[in-house]
Image (spheres, rainbow, N blue to C red):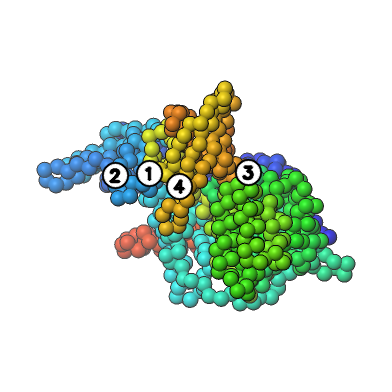
């Protein structure tokens, strides 16, 4: 067995790096993380009253550079024209100016808003000589600023000329592009690309079938060496047989390892690519971040699907994660995996993926004469049982009515019922990882990058692009939660608590519970000292929105220990306060929920360590020449656009470039 991983790094002095109109200080920390601190750039001036400009464009470009550095967006406000129709006065304000007024027809589901009534702005007056003077300046914002995410503001999404040109070249040469094209990387990476993924998809052609490739072993070795050069915390293990032949491989990059520290509560072990339509024998360790998005915690390539192989893989992953067990783990229904988990993760709660089990119904029961009736009954028993006794009674009745007592698969499911039936597992936290949508999301982690007949060499080439797209998606969600908020739908203060604390995606889930309170009826049963007991009748509805049945839940409120509990166990299962508890809080006129009801893992204001690891998946870290080349190309494209505007600019630029080329060739004064 070969092993290569590192747990320490040499200290390096801070390095000042200039990036456009801003500068940052990079620091290599003891654990291999790259910390980034923003530094004020002397080239970007702070606006002050009395500054004079020659055009409206100059004013905007000046203030926009300042806004980019500080981390806020711009909008034009309070425009006033004179009697002659000429512009006399206007303001450039922070994009969060004003108050939100919903114009949506469906107020039941309002759109996010960025408005915070921010007062930051500059006032500009225009003289009769067409001079633009800043008359008043308001610099203070009533919200946090995020310089690192300025590119997501609407006015900063202009596509760079080098990106446009690369896209045009790809179209002309009919280069097949994957879901997130290579030209994104060549433009300097996501963090330097002034467009979002949705913008890019408008320019990217659909990829065709990926052909089989050769050189898999060499590609894998080169990838591991490249990743360790970028960050010494990259981890991999290679398992060889007695004759020196490759059997199994496991790896996890530095960012994935650091992310596990924040989201070690629930992981899913996904073998989709090992068992489905893909030839690639790939297994994934996947988790859920604070937006409910999937995160990768490691990959494995396996030569076999027996217990011994899974024990090796799980042990390798556990070593990679510093011996920290996951609180809970979700897997497919596989005896070899179950045995391996019992040995390697004895302290973890193990659950079988409900979606994987239910999708096997046609395969396991499709040949039975009353298959449709059995399927309908089985789904009702699994999804609609509220109590354990109710499930077991309904299951026994189903087995008896359809003469299924000798069906081995159903018998095995009943034996393992505590590991997959919702009524048994709802008291454990699973971050909501049980729905069909979530399962499909996990299985599709590399969709768009891995297809039928994908070779290992091709997968390695696409691996970085796939993970970069995940990082970009999370960055966009962070930006949305940081700079916009979902409008409140009730007048209760505790809704605002969750709005201010949780990410937008998580807050939407809580608002879904608030909407469902409309179908709940409350009865106060009794008070036993500090403990109050309530009974909430919930009218459950089907997919068509029509009432399906009534279910009674019990809610307990302990005012001394500040505990809120409901028999539906939604909070224990998903970390979201349920509608039954919310109904009681409204009845008791509670202003704020206890701190323990707001989980840290869903908060948007937590600084998580893994976000400090920058450019983990970029190829430029080990290819300085390529980085310099692409940076120069970006600047030259911009210069060419300006130089082509007039003959004078063209002549000046050509002369300057020719002089620079002569100096570079002769190495004079360079």
- Percent x, y of residue 512: 45, 46
Label 3 Cα neighbours within 10 Å, binned few <14 / some 14-19 / many ≥20? some
Q: Quadrant of the C terminus?
A: bottom right
Relative placement, left or right, of 552 versus 95 is right
Q: Earlier in the sequence, mark 4 or mark 1?
A: 1
- Percent x, y of residue 283: 68, 62
* Mark closer to the observer (4, 1): 4
Task: Give the residue number, with chain letter if any, for mark 4.
Answer: 539
Task: Give the residue number, with chain letter if any, for mark 3.
Answer: 427
* Mark closer to the observer (1, 2): 1
Q: Which of marks 1 and 2 is nearer the N terminus?
A: 2
Q: In the figure, residue 652 lies in which quadrant?
A: bottom left
Q: What element carries label 4?
A: strand
**Mark 3 vs 1: CB contact within 8 A:** no
The image shows residue 439, relative to residue 210, as above or below, that is above
Relative placement, left or right, of 158 versus 132 is right
The image shows residue 531, relative to residue 60, as above or below, that is above
- Percent x, y of residue 493: 42, 32
Q: Which of marks 2 and 3 is nearer the N terminus?
A: 2
Could you tell me which residue is drawn at 55 percent across and 58 percent down?
Answer: 380
- Distance Cα–Cα, label 3 vs label 4: 22 Å
| Residue extending furthest toward the right | 242
Q: Which of marks 3 and 4 is nearer the N terminus?
A: 3
Relative placement, left or right, of 145 versus 185 is left
Task: Give the residue number, with chain letter if any, for mark 2.
Answer: 76
Q: Which of 578 and 206 is in front in this view?
A: 578
Task: Give the residue number, with chain letter if any, for mark 1.
Answer: 113
Could you tell me which residue is drawn at 33 percent across and 41 percent down?
Answer: 100
- Distance Cα–Cα, label 1 vs label 2: 18 Å
**Mark 2 vs 3: CB contact within 8 A:** no
Q: Is mark 3 on a helix, strand or loop?
A: loop
- Distance Cα–Cα, label 2 vs label 4: 49 Å
């Amino acid at each position: 067995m070969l092993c290569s991983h590192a747990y320490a790094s040499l200290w390096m002095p801070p390095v000042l790096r200039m990036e456009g109109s801003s500068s940052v200080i990079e620091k290599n920390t003891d654990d291999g993380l790259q910390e980034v601190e923003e530094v004020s750039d002397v080239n970007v001036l702070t606006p002050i009253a009395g500054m004079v400009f020659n055009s409206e464009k100059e004013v905007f470009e000046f203030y926009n550079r300042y806004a980019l550095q500080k981390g806020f967006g711009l909008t034009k406000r309070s425009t006033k024209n004179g009697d002659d129709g000429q512009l006399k006065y206007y303001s450039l304000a922070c994009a969060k100016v004003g108050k939100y007024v919903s114009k949506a027809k469906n107020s039941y589901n309002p759109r996010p808003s960025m408005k915070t009534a921010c007062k930051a702005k500059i006032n500009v007056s225009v003289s009769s000589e067409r001079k633009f003077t800043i008359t008043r300046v308001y610099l203070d914002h009533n919200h946090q600023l995020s310089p690192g995410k300025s590119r997501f503001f609407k006015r900063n999404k202009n596509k760079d000329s080098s990106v446009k040109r690369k896209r045009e070249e790809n179209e002309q040469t009919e280069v097949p592009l994957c879901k997130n094209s290579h030209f994104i990387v060549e433009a300097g990476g996501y963090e330097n690309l002034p467009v979002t993924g949705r913008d890019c998809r408008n320019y990217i052609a659909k990829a065709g079938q990926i052909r089989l490739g050769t050189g898999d072993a060499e590609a894998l070795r080169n990838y591991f060496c490249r990743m360790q050069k970028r960050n010494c915390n990259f981890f991999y293990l290679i398992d060889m047989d007695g004759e020196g032949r490759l059997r199994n491989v496991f790896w996890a990059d530095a960012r994935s390892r650091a992310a596990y520290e924040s989201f070690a509560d629930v992981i899913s072990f996904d073998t989709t690519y090992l068992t489905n339509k893909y030839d690639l024998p790939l297994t994934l360790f996947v988790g859920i971040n604070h937006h409910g998005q999937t995160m990768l915690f490691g990959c494995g390539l396996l030569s076999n699907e027996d217990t011994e192989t899974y024990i090796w893989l799980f042990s390798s992953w556990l070593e990679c994660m510093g011996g920290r067990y996951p609180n809970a783990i979700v897997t497919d229904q596989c005896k070899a995996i179950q045995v391996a988990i019992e040995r390697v993760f004895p302290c973890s709660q193990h659950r079988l993926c409900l979606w994987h089990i239910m999708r096997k119904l046609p395969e396991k029961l499709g040949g039975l004469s009353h298959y449709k009736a059995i399927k309908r009954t089985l789904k009702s028993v699994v999804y609609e049982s509220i109590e354990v006794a109710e499930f077991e009674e309904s299951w026994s009745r189903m087995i008896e009515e359809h003469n299924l007592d000798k069906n081995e698969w159903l018998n095995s499911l009943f034996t393992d019922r505590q590991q997959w039936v919702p009524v048994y597992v709802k008291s454990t936290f699973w971050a909501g990882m049980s729905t069909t949508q979530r399962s499909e999301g996990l299985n599709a982690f590399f969709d768009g990058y891995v297809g039928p007949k994908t070779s290992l060499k091709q997968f390695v080439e696409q691996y970085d692009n796939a993970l970069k797209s995940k990082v970009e998606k999370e960055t966009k969600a962070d930006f949305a939660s940081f700079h916009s908020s979902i409008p409140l739908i009730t007048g209760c203060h505790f809704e605002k608590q969750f709005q201010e604390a949780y990410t937008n995606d998580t807050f939407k889930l809580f608002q879904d519970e608030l909407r469902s309170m409309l179908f709940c009826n409350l009865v106060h049963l009794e008070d036993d000292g500090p403990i109050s007991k309530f009974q909430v009748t919930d009218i459950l509805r089907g997919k068509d929105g029509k009432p399906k049945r009534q279910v009674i839940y019990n809610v307990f409120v302990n005012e001394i220990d500040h505990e809120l509990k409901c028999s539906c166990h939604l909070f224990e299962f998903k970390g979201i306060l349920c509608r039954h508890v919310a109904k009681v809080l409204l009845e008791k006129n509670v202003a704020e929920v206890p701190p323990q009801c707001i989980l840290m893992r869903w908060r948007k204001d937590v600084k998580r360590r893994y976000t400090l690891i920058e450019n983990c998946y970029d190829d430029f870290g080990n290819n300085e020449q390529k980085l310099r080349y692409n940076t120069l190309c970006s600047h030259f494209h911009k210069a060419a656009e300006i130089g082509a505007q007039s003959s004078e600019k063209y002549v000046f630029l050509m002369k300057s470039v020719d002089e620079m080329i002569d100096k570079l060739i002769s190495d004079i004064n360079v």
